[in-house]
Amino acid sequence: MAGARPGIGVLIAVGLLGLAALPAPASAGYTVSQYQIGPVSIPDGHGAARLDFDLVGPGGGQTVSYVRPRFRISHKRTRQLKLLIKGPDGTTVLLSNHDTRGRRLGQDPCAPDPNDVAFTGFYDLGADGPIGEGSAPYVGDFVPFEPLSAFAGRSIGGDWQLVAKDTEPGKRGRLLCGALIVYYTSS
């Protein structure tokens, strides 16, 4: 991704870069995805860093079947973090609630490959369980703290956010990169 600037999203073909290691549910239909390279500083204590994704489907009427957020984070104490995804209509899902230990979520350097932390709501598609049951650097697919099904049936179009919140003072970190994959159907 040479020449990419922080905060600039790059549309990618999901299958080419390994971001679709887990298959989508049979009802998903199509995918749209975006990958963003930071880093974005996570403010120390009670601050948040975010990556913004402006997703647009090929036309009107697309609704979410399934959402798959991915992160890479460097933080001296990841236990201080909450990870969230926020949809265009304000729907917010808590992915991780102070569930990790260590300094890394995912492996450096950032690249559109599967060496990051991903969340999926489907055990039968290969999820490793809740992230708190994993170990640093938490590379793999984890079941989120709250269900991603909150986005099902909602419009895909608009501004999505991946958010890393630091809830305790004392240590700093960076949201290195992230990806958002949205499986959708057309009505």
Image: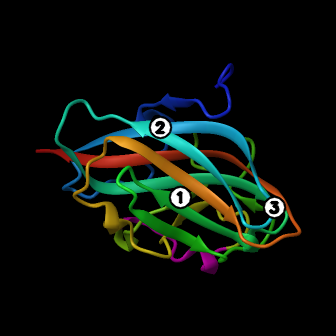
- Is disc 2 surrounded by few (<14), some (14 to 19) or many (20+) residues within 10 Å? many
Q: Earlier in the sequence, mark 3 or mark 2?
A: 2
* Disc ID at residue 73: none
Image coords of residue 103 (percent x, y): 81, 63
Image coords of residue 17 (percent x, y): 50, 36
Give the farthest residue toward the bottom.
133
Query: Residues in magenta?
Result: 125-134
Q: Earlier in the sequence, mark 1 or mark 2?
A: 2
Quarter of the rendering containing residue 38: top right
Q: Earlier in the sequence, mark 1 or mark 3?
A: 3
* Direction from residue 35 to residue 121 in the image, left or right: left
Instruction: Name the mark nearer the viewer: 3 or 2.
Output: 3
Q: CA distance from mark 3 to mark 2?
A: 27 Å
Quarter of the rendering containing residue 121: bottom left
Q: Specify whether residue 131 is painted magenta.
A: yes
Secondary structure that dominates the magenta span: loop
State the residue position of label 2.
34
Residue 57 in sight from this viewpoint: yes
Q: CA distance from mark 1 to mark 2?
A: 14 Å
* Disc ID at residue 118: 1
Give the farthest residue toward the left.
187
Asked which secondary structure carries label 1, the reply is: strand
Residue 111 in sight from this viewpoint: no
What colour scheme governs how the chains and residues are painted in the rendered image of this protein?
A: rainbow
